[in-house]
């Protein structure tokens, strides 16, 4: 039986209390990397985490700007981003989702619900990646068949 790879979550929050709280239950399930600023998050995203949990209200660069920058970089634009924030207006949520986030959690977050939603988005990413790979292989096979027919 093959062992499942432990997924990596990039946790981006400038508040040490929030980081400590989230790590209490995230560390049990995932490898957790932490960034305490938007600039650090962008740098660490180059390591291709499986998912990013991103706070919105941060001093150097807000989460909306971080999301825009990550989604505009082709090499990392496919990483699912989940906003986690105290901003609870529908307008804030719409803005976050329209920037490309896959979900929007309002703090405080319940540990079991958070894990379930993260796992859903990780599974969706895996299925999407598998579909892209199958599509690539199919295109390759079609090209080879065309060459053989010539």
Image (cartoon, rainbow, N blue to C red):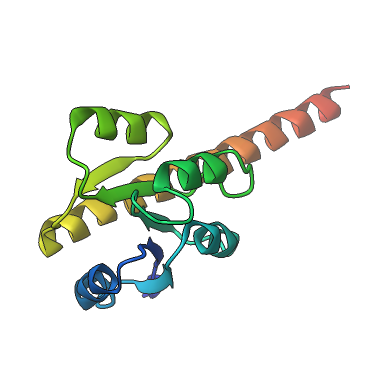
Residue 72 location in percent, x, y? 59, 38
Is 34 placed above or below 109 here? below
Residue 21 location in percent, x, y? 20, 72
Q: Residue furthest front?
A: 59
Nearer-the-camera pick, 103 or 94: 94
Quadrant in which the C terminus appears: top right
Q: Tell me if 86 is positioned left or right of 130 in this view.
A: left
Nearer-the-camera pick, 2 or 99: 99
Q: Residue furthest top?
A: 150
Q: Tell me if 1 is positioned left or right of 78 in this view.
A: left
Q: Is residue 47 visible?
A: yes
Q: Tell me if 77 is positioned left or right of 88 in this view.
A: right
Nearer-the-camera pick, 95 or 72: 95
Nearer-the-camera pick, 137 or 109: 109
Q: Which residue does the image show at 14% across and 64% down from the upper left?
A: 111
Q: Which residue does the image show at 17% across and 54% down from the upper left?
A: 107
Is 83 placed above or below 72 here? below
Q: Which residue does the image show at 34% across and 40% down from the upper left?
A: 102
Q: Is residue 120 visible?
A: no
Q: Which residue does the image show at 56% across and 43% down from the upper left?
A: 69
Residue 106 location in percent, x, y? 18, 48
Q: For the image shown, how many numbered marks are present on the structure?
A: 0
Residue 34 location in percent, x, y? 41, 71
Quadrant in which the N terminus appears: bottom left
Q: Tell me if 27 is positioned left or right of 129 in this view.
A: left
């Amino acid at each position: 039986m093959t062992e499942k790879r432990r997924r990596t979550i990039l946790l981006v929050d400038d508040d040490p209390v929030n980081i400590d709280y989230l790590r209490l239950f995230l560390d049990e399930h995932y490898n957790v990397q932490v960034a305490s600023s938007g600039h650090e998050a962008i740098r660490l995203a180059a390591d291709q985490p499986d998912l990013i949990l991103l706070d919105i209200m941060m001093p150097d660069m807000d989460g909306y700007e971080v999301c825009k920058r990550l989604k505009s970089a082709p090499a990392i634009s496919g990483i699912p981003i989940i906003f986690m924030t105290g901003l609870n207006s529908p307008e804030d949520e719409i803005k976050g989702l329209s920037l490309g986030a896959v979900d929007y959690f309002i703090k405080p977050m319940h540990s079991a619900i958070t894990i379930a939603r993260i796992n859903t988005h990780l599974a969706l990413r895996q299925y999407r990646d598998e579909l892209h790979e199958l599509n690539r292989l199919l295109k390759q096979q079609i090209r080879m068949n065309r060459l053989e027919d010539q």
